Amino acid sequence: QVQLVESGGGLVQPGGSLRLSCAASGWIFSLDVMGWYRQAPGKQRELVATITSGGSTNYADSMKGRFTISRDTGKNTKNTVYLQMNSLKPEDTAVYYCKAVRVYMSGSTLGNQTYWGQGTQVTVSS
């Protein structure tokens, strides 16, 4: 069973930076997609950024240029993903969740399994 553990959240002033980390355990192969989502109070969970095992990235428009997602490439750390957040704004305040997707073949059918972390709080306030 894949488990995701996030770290790096906290309180930061507007304009500041934070770096979130998410480490997956329980799976020795590369997880096909890893990413970050966030949920602010009273709002739906939304995409922040994703990265594939091949390094392709995707960002929500409002995060482009401020947030950078990256992934370790080491043999034993390939399922660790980071989110560097710069120029933080109060509206970035949310719980940030790590997500991983494993794609597999079951007979002739392509399936996928999704895993979520517990979330880490990011608060941007002066």
Image (cartoon, rainbow, N blue to C red):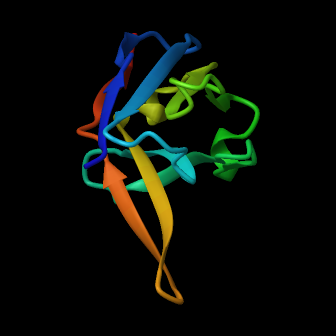
Count of picture labels: 0
Q: Residue furthest bottom?
A: 108
- Front position in the image: 20 or 81: 81
- Residue farthest to the front? 107
- Residue 111 in the image: above or below residue 86: below
User: Which residue corresponds to the image point at 30% horizontal and 46% vertical from the top-left?
Assistant: 2
Q: In which quarter of the image is residue 62?
A: top right
Left or right, 84 with respect to 96, comes to: right
Pick whichever, 43 or 18, lies toward us: 18
Depicted 23 relative to depicted 13: above or below: below
Q: Where is residue 67 in the image (x, y as percent from the top left)?
A: 65, 30
Seen at 44% across and 50% down, the residue is 100
Q: Is residue 46 left or right of residue 117?
A: right
Where does residue 60 sit, x and y in percent of width and height?
A: 64, 51
Q: Is residue 73 above or below residue 32?
A: above
Nearer to the camera, 45 or 90: 45
Q: Image check: 106 left or right of 56?
A: left
Give the residue displayed 26% in from the left and 46% down from the top: 41
The x, y position of residue 105, in whole percent, is: 50, 76
- Name the quarter where the C terminus is drawn: top left
> Which x, y percent locates residue 95?
31, 37
